[in-house]
Image: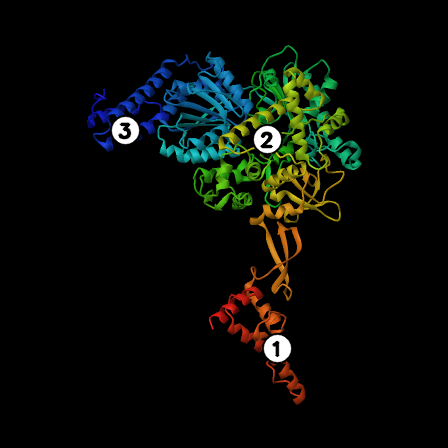
Amino acid sequence: MASDPSTTPDLTGGEELHALVDSCMLADRHRLTRQLGNIRRKRGHGGSAMAQVQERIENSRNRAQQRQQQLPEITVNANLPIADHADQLAAAIRKHQVVIVAGETGSGKSTQLPKICLQAGRGIFGQIGHTQPRRVAARSIANRLATELDRPLGTQIGYKVRFNDQSGADCLVKVMTDGILLAESRSDRWLNQYDTLIIDEAHERSLNIDFLLGMLKGLLQRRPELKLIITSATIDTAQFSQFFADAPVFEVSGRGYPVEMRYRPLTRPAGHTDDADSADDPVAATPASEKSPTLSAVKQRQAADINQGILAAIDELAAEGPGDMLVFLPGERDIVDAEKYLAQRLKQRFEILPLYSRLSQADQDRIFKQRQQRRVILATNVAETSLTVPGIHYVIDSGLARVSRYSSRLKIQRLPIEKISQASASQRAGRCGRIAPGICIRLYAEDDFNNRAAQTEPEIVRTNLASVILQMLNLRMGDPQQFPFIDAPQRRLIRDGYLGLTELGALIDEQQLSLIGKQLAQLPIDPRLGRMLIAARDNGGLYELAIITAGLTIQDPRERPREFQQQADQRHRLFQHPESDFITLLNLWNSWQEQAEQLSNSKLRRWCRDHYLNYMRMREWQDLHRQLQQQIRQQGWPQIRIDDEKLRYQRIHEALICGLLSNLARQTERRDYQGARNTQLKLFPGSALAKAPPAWIVAAELVETSQLFARTAARIERQWIEPLAGHLLHRSYSEPHWSAKKKEVFAFEKVTLFGLPVVDRRRTRYSDIDPVESRRLFIRDGLVADQYTENFHFITHNRELVAEIEELEVRTRRHDLLADDEKRITFFDHQLPAEICNGYKFKTWYRRQLAEG
């Protein structure tokens, strides 16, 4: 097959090896081709090197052959609608580079498409990558595939989500979140480990999905052997097809039963909230004693209406016959509230189960185990498309979802509860009627449904794009305005993204990342949090900031059950720092770590329950902190502990300021706060600072509900800001004046950051700021008005001459002998070099003139 490795191979041998590369693993082909090319260019000097490359080629080919031989027996589940289309889909995958699969809920597309790809010969030379929007769906689908193919999870079928990698190089199919695939593209721009990619639930149009599709559009041209399968609900597949050069669309109809729609609007319209976001915050919700009675009544009535509506719908559906019920609610907090409300009233009739992304693995698994007792499952939109919950006969739809939405005016990311689109409502209704005729009760009016938007807005048109632009520049993907997004974001969103990166010091210009920007792109967290870590690395406090930034990334682990609010508040005060909610997080972490070292897992869980802490979120915090620590150690960043408590506080909060420069605020006379760009905001009532608000604060986030609130805040000193925000500060000057004592022109400086007065009135040298005006004032007030007091001969001579002329004018009663001020100013202006603008420069110049004669 190849010439003797001890001799230089001839051209034919090299060509044979080149041909063999095509049967190697995809991840090896580019490297092996490059190595062969290097050897051929050397001619006569590559015998040993050629032998090494030949060995690598054989190893790679053997690995591909082993994958082929170890293929499991593949059978598509005949009970699922997609089975009727399996042969057509396999043929289309062989023929076309891109295939769109439109499948209704329950069609089996998520679990069966990877098997159809294996049947089509994919997964041998590279892995089949299968992305999901949510971690819970990725784990569930991987488990299902492993079970159906009778393989242990993590061998030939694996999954990879944040903090949990159950995959390996031998996996044929790797299920992962779309964020994981994006992260892999940073180190492998061509995604060479994959021969096929399945982008599932593409109709959700998350930021990650749109970014991936735009990236893959260009990658497909460079990798003609790569196959892409995009799955979507049956709605709006034409847009995907057109985006990928009229790729073929296969529609997989569900074998569903009819679903009866019933409209049961609440007495108070769903979605009409006065303070929807604060109701979802388990920590910062206002203690009852501090609430406004009016607002409290409004919020309690709103919650009661939703829960009463659900209870009434359950009673109505229970009379229809057996079967489990799936209830859609906007957020985790709403699920917790509804679960407690229903559990008190349904007693032993139903098992009440929650379902949301952050639920523990054990609790998620309970959803998929059939029980004898009838179930009511309370879910967020994670159950809308990503997961198929078995045994559902009935759906109750609140018509609401929590939607992340960026406010260009306020420069903040809002998280309001909004009405879902008609498409989302149809997806929810489609979750019943799969095993028998179903009923969907909508807790809103039919007219309300008909007036809703047809489709859910893509996330890319309603989010801050700073992190997207950061990664695009890091991967050298070109101008974001020219990037092939399916729906191009508005220019103002791109502009705001650039402004956000400029605020962090991440840019040299719009095409180039600074050193800080390149470092931010390598960190697995939000750029603002990453900027805090870099600042702490440079100035101290990195040990503490790694803990705090990890804590800010997760959902707050502190819980505040409605019936135990006072007890929860009392327990949480054990960790509270009176001046900083960030130090409160640090105190909480330290207590957790101390207990984790001493207690068993079961006792640690009990400690969390006793202190109203979510155990799984604490574990997630721990996992993310471990990930950050690995990154910090790899970079060789020093983590020096600061012993001095006052200095430690300052260094921690200076680092926080570096990432949160637009989240600073100062107290006004009205006791509220002025934020960046003249926004008005208040401390969130649950903050430790609320009882004694400081003059200046920094906040982790600004959240708009009934008004704009600063959440997770801390006291800062105004003088800390200027050294940290130099590139963003606006400086203005007033009242320039000559100082005879200092022999210099001074002015009063005002320094602002996004309109906030960092320095009100500071006397500063003006000659460096406006040398032209300083020169004019020096000549006028220093030389002409005789306020420049150096002991030079010409000054004494001029002073005596002026006195003589003034005396002569008095004696002769004339007023035209002495040149007026303007003429003398003009005289000095012509005589002095342009750079003379203060006494020091004049003195230096004049002495040089005297020395030169």
Q: Nearer the viewer, mark 3 or mark 1?
A: 1
Q: Amino acid at mark 1?
A: Arg
Residue designated by label 3: 36
On the question of residue 444 being in view, the answer is no
Estimate the spatial distance between the alpha carbons at disc 2 and disc 1, rounded to whole Å: 71 Å
Q: Nearer the viewer, residue 682 or 418?
A: 682
Give neighbour class at mark 1: few <14, some 14-19, many 20+ (Cα, 10 Å): few
Residue designated by label 2: 550
* Image coordinates for residue 489, horizontal then vertical, percent: 51, 41
Residue at x 59% of width, y 13% of height: 369
Query: Which disc number belongs to residue 588?
Result: none
Residue designated by label 1: 799
Whether residue 24 sits left or right of residue 148 in the image: it is left
Estimate the spatial distance between the alpha carbons at disc 3 and disc 2, rounded to whole Å: 46 Å
Quadrant where the image shows the N terminus: top left
* Image coordinates for residue 671, horizontal then vertical, percent: 75, 45
